[in-house]
Image: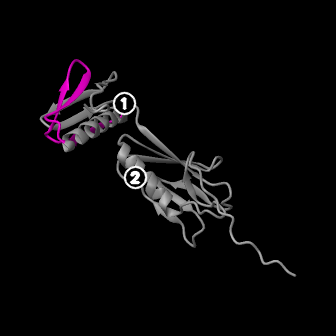
């Protein structure tokens, strides 16, 4: 058995699930998510506890078992609590900043122009000028992570001075740079 796949998922209060064959819809206080799962994985709801079982012990089925459980757990967590990813504009980046213009994120990150970043559907962006952070929030973990990655991609941190946009808690490996010529 898959160690991840055999773990049951308990439904928090206020979360409803509808299983229609291999299609699952999860509704909660934050919103609604729907996903089509592989037919080799059977889903059952036993009084607020979700269990996943696989049809056979083939390699693909074993892999899908853990993946399906993780995806379903992310759906349940997303509609009940939501997901947040925080990005930081490094302190070494003088003049770099981010601000909101309506729902769009405006990034001033050393280019000759302002980078306008419209959020995808279901994603909320926020900035804090004092701590120089950008917050990406939503109910779908995949979309939150992908949006944060796209924002970081605008100006990833460089290894010499450390300027750029990085994830909160990310450690940037720094390089020494060139050593100057010595005069004789």
In the rendered image, residue 58, in percent from the top left (x then y), is placed at 17, 41
- Residues drawn in magenta: 30-58
4 vs 153, left or right, is left
CA distance for labels 2 and 1: 20 Å
Q: Does residue 49 show up magenta in the picture?
A: yes
Q: Earlier in the sequence, mark 2 or mark 1?
A: 1
Q: Does residue 151 show up magenta in the picture?
A: no
In the rendered image, residue 151, in percent from the top left (x then y), is placed at 48, 57
Question: At 37% across and 40% down in the image, what residue appears?
Answer: 139
Q: Which residue is mark 2?
A: 146
**Residue 12, numbered label:** none
Question: At 31% across and 37% down in the image, what residue appears?
Answer: 70
13 relative to 78, above or below: above
Decide which of 105, 74 is in the foreground and name it. 74
SS assignment at label 2: helix
Q: Which residue is mark 1?
A: 80
159 vs 117, left or right, is right
Question: At 34% across and 36% down in the image, what residue appears?
Answer: 74
């Amino acid at each position: 058995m898959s160690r991840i796949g055999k773990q049951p998922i308990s439904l928090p209060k206020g979360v409803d699930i509808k299983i229609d064959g291999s299609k699952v819809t999860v509704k909660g206080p934050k919103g609604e998510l729907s996903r089509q799962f592989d037919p080799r994985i059977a889903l059952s709801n036993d009084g607020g506890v979700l269990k996943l079982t696989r049809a056979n012990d083939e390699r693909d089925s074993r892999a899908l078992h853990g993946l399906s459980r993780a995806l379903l757990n992310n759906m349940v967590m997303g509609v009940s609590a939501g997901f947040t990813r925080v990005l930081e504009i490094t302190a070494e980046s003088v003049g770099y900043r981010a601000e909101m213009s309506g729902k769009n994120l405006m990034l001033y990150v050393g280019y000759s122009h302002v980078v306008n970043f419209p959020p995808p559907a279901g994603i909320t962006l926020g900035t804090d000028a004092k701590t120089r952070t950008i917050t990406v929030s939503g109910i779908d973990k995949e979309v939150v992570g992908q949006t944060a990655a796209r924002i970081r991609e605008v100006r990833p941190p460089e290894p010499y001075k450390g300027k750029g946009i990085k994830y909160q808690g990310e450690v940037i490996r720094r390089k020494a740079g060139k050593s100057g010529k010595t005069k004789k």
